[in-house]
Amino acid sequence: MDDKPNPGTLSESSEPLFSFGVIADIQYADLEDGYNFHGSRRRYYRHSLLHLRGAIEHWNEESSAPCCVLQLGDIIDGYNAQYKASEKSLELVMSTFQTLKAPVHHTWGNHEFYNFSRDYLTNSKLNTKFLEDHIVHHPETMPSEDYYAYHFVPFPKFRFILLDAYDLSVLGVDQSSPKYQQCLQMLREHNPNTELNSPQGLSEPQFVQFNGGFSQEQLNWLNEVLTFSDTNQEKVVIAIFPFTLRPLTVCAWPGITGTPWRSSGLTSAWCVSLLVTLMMVATLRILSVCTMSTWKGLLRQLRTARLLAQFMSILTK
């Protein structure tokens, strides 16, 4: 048997190429503790800002600073709209992010749309498309203004892609618009419940009002970017909200649950939000990205124990 180490494997002495931070579901509100929609998980609305500050302190103190931070949505809680505190709460959280030394890339979740319209978000500090990468001579990799998605390169041969999981949605859209009517029709065709946020009795429980989906236009664009990355042997990280296999109620319409990049044949793709959602134990993750030939190789070499060892978790309270 040949005991020589595989040059593509990850050893204890491997040096990380770069690192990046991930934070999700801050859901800040100037409120006392409460519970989620189903009453099954405790929410620490006001306390969440302390976790954000702790995360930023950690990132700023790292000897090898993260190249960027991905903020995966639900930055403030929907309760802010009820108390007419949306803009004030957003400004407080964004001013906290200003103390971070690394750039932040924002994605949008359902709580963003509980508080603001899509037009508002497009013109807000939560729109970070100005950080996108422009691939010369490849106009097909430029996203449309009709959805909020873009890609950037934090390190040579690595491409990060942010997707708009509410490209198709009844949230944050003018109810008189054709797009709203199209999405409402799609929703009602799959969800006959009076309460459209209820998955009761549905064979496709992802069709609830708090979810959204991808237009064919956005998926075509994604395929073009992935084709470019595959041709140029780039590793790809996809950041998105929501993106999980279980429970089905947090899958995107129309049932895209985990691999929209398969059509390109890409193997070196990793979905950030998938790991964040499945772990369900914290809001902060730090990942050191090491040289890997394929995503399958990453899964094989970074077993669960080692993944947990590479991530730093902020306790829920």
Image: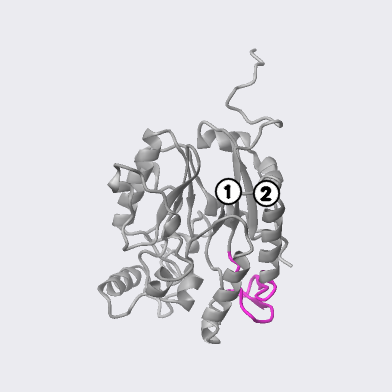
Label 2 packing within 10 angstroms: few (<14), some (14-19), many (20+): some
Q: Does the magenta segment cover residue 266? A: no
Q: Quadrant of residue 49?
A: bottom right
The answer to whether residue 44 of the structure is visible from this angle is yes
Q: Which residue lies under the disc numbered 1?
A: 67
Who comes first in sequence, dot 2 or dot 1?
1
Q: Amino acid at mark 2?
A: Phe
Q: Quadrant of the C terminus?
A: bottom right
Q: Is residue 116 left or right of residue 21?
A: left
Q: Position of residue 111 (x, y in %)?
A: 51, 72
> Relative to 199, is 159 above or below?
above
Q: Residue at x 71, y 32 (%)?
A: 12
Q: Position of residue 130 (x, y in %)?
A: 42, 58
Prevailing secondary structure class for the magenta stretch in the rendered image = loop
> Residue placed farthest to the bottom in the image?
83
Query: Helix or strand or loop: what does disc 1 sit on?
Result: loop
Q: Which residue lies under the disc numbered 2?
A: 311
In three-dimensional space, the C-alpha distance between marks 2 and 1, rounded to whole angstroms, equals: 16 Å
Q: Position of residue 87 (x, y in %)?
A: 52, 79
Q: Which residues are magenta?
A: 25-48
> Residue placed farthest to the top in the image?
1
